[in-house]
Image (cartoon, grey):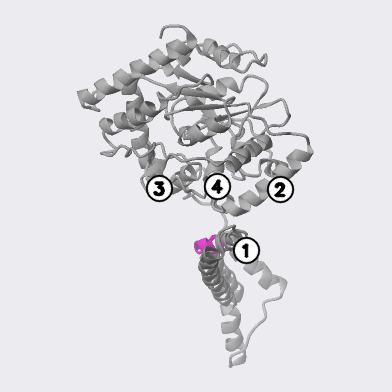
């Protein structure tokens, strides 16, 4: 009886160690996929060889430590059999644990390890879900292989490239999510959703495997009253541009404006075709980074519609500051939040916040926990946006979107000239007020308000009505 108890205890300790060291399993999986990603890379031979050597070395040590871990775990399980074999025979011997009693003891001991006591994972994503996201989103080359395969399949279905699409943009916290959600109530639009995560470059392949049926929603992490679920639409297309450029425009402290090549532009249209389920559907995306490549995109395509939202600078900057402070703390508590936002190119706030650099002008610097910094961020973005002059770019004040959402939707749909009609949308009141706990430089605020008035004037000319 004591032998069976010892055997159960040893198996418990063995599996407890395996559970404690489970990151080695995850590391082995990540290093294996990383090596495959490097093998299919289109880099030049010297760079590819250097990367392969690095990945092979990492995989070798991961595999070695994994094998050592398994051997050590097996020795722990077999320790009672070895000790009792010596005790019975008077010399070193081994009792093979093959009887049903011994196997039952091992099974019970191992099972006890996996009984949930108190969950320590504070993230809303399980460890296995996080691993799947890392395998899918950290390996651009594998993603593009799947992307190329899907594009070929889509072309066979008759879904051709289409230069008519809508981009909703603006600085974060300008109401872009609300506008996107309003537009998606109109039948005829197609957009990315959380159901496409994490295989964003192969949405149709992933859809065959994963089709969430849970319709429940909860308030998103922004704590702004917007509810999301597994099928909610979101700003996810930036991952495509990150993979396409291999993160070339992402620098340590900034996101740099860059030129999209014509081939890259066509790849983007091909990507849109993967999201559209029929030739008549129009692609719709929310992308707050879109201005980084707007000039070259417009040079290739005068027909797509860009909608830029803007907001009272004091309230806008205050909202950005408060979200930056909130997400900085949240990402410290749950590092996966930062990892997730980085994958999607969401550098608007938080520990990995990066300012936009347009042209050669240096991006704003300063204390990110001060309102002055976020007023500079606001000025930097909208000074550039104000220069946009074309018939297919609309500027909408956030305050107008809240007060007259249906009127603004009708103006947007009118630009498409395809008969789409706006649903009934009720006005929304945002009661946010500036808090005196965030002081600012008066000169900076005056400059921002002057720019705000210029943006309002621009919107008035476009819509032929005063704001």
In the current view of this chain or complex, which residue is farthest to the bottom? 91
In this picture, residue 365 sits left or right of residue 35: left
Q: Could you classify mark 3 by the number of other residues whose Cα lies within 10 Å: few (under 14), some (14-19), or many (20 or more)? A: few
Image spot of residue 315 (x, y percent): 34, 22
Image spot of residue 328 (x, y percent): 36, 41
- Pointer 1 residue: 108
Q: Earlier in the sequence, mark 2 or mark 3?
A: 2
Kindly state the secondary structure of the residue where label 2 is placed.
Answer: helix
Q: Earlier in the sequence, mark 4 or mark 2?
A: 2
Q: Earlier in the sequence, mark 2 or mark 1?
A: 1
- Pointer 2 residue: 149
Kindly state the secondary structure of the residue where label 3 is placed.
Answer: loop
Residue 44 in view here: yes
Q: Could you classify mark 4 by the number of other residues whose Cα lies within 10 Å: few (under 14), some (14-19), or many (20 or more)? A: some
Numbered circle sitting on residue 251: 3
> Residue drawn at (62%, 53%), measured in percent from left and top?
142
- Give the quadrant of the C terminus: top left
Region of the chain picked out in magenta, as a range: 20-28
- Pointer 4 residue: 243
User: Viewer-nearest of labels 3 and 1?
Assistant: 3
């Amino acid at each position: 009886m004591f032998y069976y108890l010892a055997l159960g205890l040893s198996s418990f300790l063995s599996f407890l160690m395996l559970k404690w060291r489970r990151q080695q399993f995850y590391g082995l999986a990540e290093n294996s996929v990383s090596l495959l990603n490097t093998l299919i890379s289109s880099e030049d031979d010297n760079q590819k060889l250097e990367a392969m050597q690095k990945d092979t070395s990492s995989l070798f040590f991961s595999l070695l430590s994994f094998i050592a871990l398994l051997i050590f775990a097996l020795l722990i399980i077999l320790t009672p059999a070895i000790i009792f074999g010596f005790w019975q025979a008077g010399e070193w011997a081994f009792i093979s644990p093959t009887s049903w009693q011994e196997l039952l003891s091992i099974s019970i001991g191992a099972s006890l390890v996996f009984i949930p006591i108190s969950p320590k994972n504070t993230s809303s994503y399980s460890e296995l879900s996080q691993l799947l996201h890392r395998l899918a989103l950290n390996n651009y080359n594998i993603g593009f292989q799947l992307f190329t395969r899907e594009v070929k399949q889509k072309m066979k279905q008759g879904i051709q490239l289409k230069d008519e699409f809508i981009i909703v943009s603006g600085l974060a916290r300008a109401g872009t999510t609300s506008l996107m959600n309003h537009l998606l109530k109109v039948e005829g639009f197609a957009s990315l959703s959380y159901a496409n995560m994490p295989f964003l470059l192969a949405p149709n392949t992933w859809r065959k495997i994963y089709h969430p049926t849970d319709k429940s929603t909860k308030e998103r992490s922004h704590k702004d009253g917007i509810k999301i679920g597994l099928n909610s639409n979101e700003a996810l297309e930036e991952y495509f541009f990150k993979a396409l450029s291999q993160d070339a425009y992402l620098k340590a402290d900034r996101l740099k404006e860059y030129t999209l090549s014509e081939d890259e532009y066509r790849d983007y249209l091909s990507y849109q075709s993967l999201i559209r389920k029929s030739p008549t559907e129009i692609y719709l995306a929310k992308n707050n980074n879109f201005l980084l490549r707007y000039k070259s995109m417009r040079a290739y395509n005068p027909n797509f519609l860009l909608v830029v939202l803007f907001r009272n600078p004091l309230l806008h900057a205050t909202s950005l500051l408060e979200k930056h402070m909130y997400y900085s703390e949240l990402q410290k508590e749950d590092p996966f939040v930062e990892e997730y936002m980085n994958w999607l190119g969401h550098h608007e706030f938080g520990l990995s916040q990066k300012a936009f650099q347009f042209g050669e002008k240096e991006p704003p610097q300063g204390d990110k926990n001060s309102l002055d910094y976020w007023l500079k961020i606001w000025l930097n973005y909208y000074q550039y946006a104000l220069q946009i002059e074309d018939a297919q770019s609309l500027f909408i004040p956030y305050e107008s979107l809240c007060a007259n959402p249906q009127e603004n939707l009708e103006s947007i749909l009118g630009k498409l000239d395809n008969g789409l009609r706006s649903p009934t949308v009720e006005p929304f009141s945002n009661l946010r007020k500036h808090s005196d706990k965030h002081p600012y430089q008066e000169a900076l605020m005056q400059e921002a308000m002057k720019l705000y008035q210029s943006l309002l004037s621009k919107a008035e000319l476009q819509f032929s009505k005063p704001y």
